[in-house]
Image: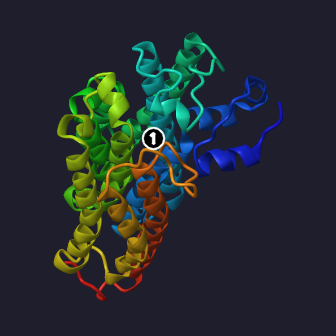
Amino acid sequence: MKINLSMWKKALSGLVKMDSKEEWDGLDIISKWLIATRSGVTIVTLYSCAIGGLLAIRHGYFEGNWGMSILAWLITTIGLFIAHGTNNFLNDYTDFSRGVDTDNYFRTQYGVHPLIQKFWTKEQQFRWFAVSGTLALLTGIFALFYTRFSLDIIILFAIGALVLLLYTWPLKHIALGELSIFLVWGPIMVAAVFLVLARGDASRFWQVALAGIPWGLSVVSINLGKHIDKAPEDKKKKVGTLPVVIGEKAARYVNMAVLALIYIILLVLVFVTHYFTPILLIVFFAGKRALYAVGVHTKPRPEEPPKEWQYWPTWFSGFAFYHNRLFSNLLLLAVLIDTIIRLVLPAFWPAL
């Protein structure tokens, strides 16, 4: 079995579809893990961790011990990435066991579902979940020791673990899944990574949590778009996502508001709180894609995909993902440059 680096890249850049069990069996372990956990989407975790780490550098928590700080950053990032994948293993296992995921369900149409496609058994899926969960837990234990068992870290880890266990059921079924996604991958994860690297110093916690809100909104725009896309199927299966509860039209307007709030809050962070310098405004180069996504949300989902659209059955989520890809890279670049400016020219844009 050869290591397939090209498949790693493919799995990290988008969702992989595959119909042949023989092809699946020929993949290396890492490729299978990346595809089965939908790493083209779970890569958002890496951005949350990168933002939290850069803000820790900006506030001086790497000074005097760069080597250990970078190691802690890498371990925490890998652990959270694995934890996100573990959540997806559990998500698929739970939905398959409860009869939500079936041969023609939305989830099976846009990527590999090893259980539905019989690439492996429920027992094998559970073993993958257990191994991934153990690795994520070990990195969490490292973080606890690294922060000297900070109570704040323990609380944040407990929240993350609860979401991991409860997202698929019942949170997603009572219209709380979307809120959970926003909170965890935005303010909570960004602030948690920062807090680990600050070794439990919570003096900047709320500033950093606020700085994580635009990123969390960008992530949840994809999740909410996906739930709008599959609302008819979810309604039939009594999965009470937010679009099922409030209706497709209302959910479309909520997602338009989410996309607009990303940029409004960034303006607040630059011009009201001065937490970021105006360099953050480079993310507005993703504004054109945001407008595309908003424009699509003004109309109901088409019955059939347009000829030029390659990503069906995703529609609203496809445009939100298209926006997120550019926005995420611009945001990370902007935070990096902003961090350098804050370290080299602290008087350039003094925080209020």
Q: Is residue 292 left or right of residue 249?
A: right
- For this rendering, which residue is in front, 202 or 332? 332
Q: Is residue 31 left or right of residue 298?
A: right
Its colouring scheme is rainbow
- Residue wearing tag 1: 80
Residue 32 spot, x, y in % from top left: 66, 32
Look at 28% across and 22% down and name the residue there: 238
- For this rendering, which residue is in front, 329 or 81? 329
Residue 3 spot, x, y in % from top left: 79, 39
Q: Residues within 10 Å of mark 1 (few under 14, many from 20)?
A: many
Q: Please tell me whether residue 305 is drawn above or below residue 61 in the rendered image.
A: above
Residue 51 in which image quadrant: bottom left
Q: Quadrant of the N terminus?
A: top right
Amino acid type shown at disc 1: Leu
Q: Is residue 328 left or right of residue 173?
A: right
Q: Please tell me whether residue 324 is drawn above or below residue 177 in the rendered image.
A: below
Q: Residue furthest top?
A: 123
Q: Please tell me whether residue 170 is drawn above or below residue 241 in the rendered image.
A: above
Look at 47% across and 20% down and name the residue there: 93
Q: Is residue 117 left or right of residue 259?
A: right
Which element is circle 1 on?
helix
- For this rendering, which residue is in front, 3 or 241? 241
Look at 74% across and 32% down and name the residue there: 28
Q: Residue furthest bottom?
A: 348
Residue 344 spot, x, y in % from top left: 41, 83
Residue 306 spot, x, y in % from top left: 52, 54
Q: Quadrant of the C terminus?
A: bottom left
Q: Can see residue 159?
A: yes
Q: Can see residue 37?
A: no
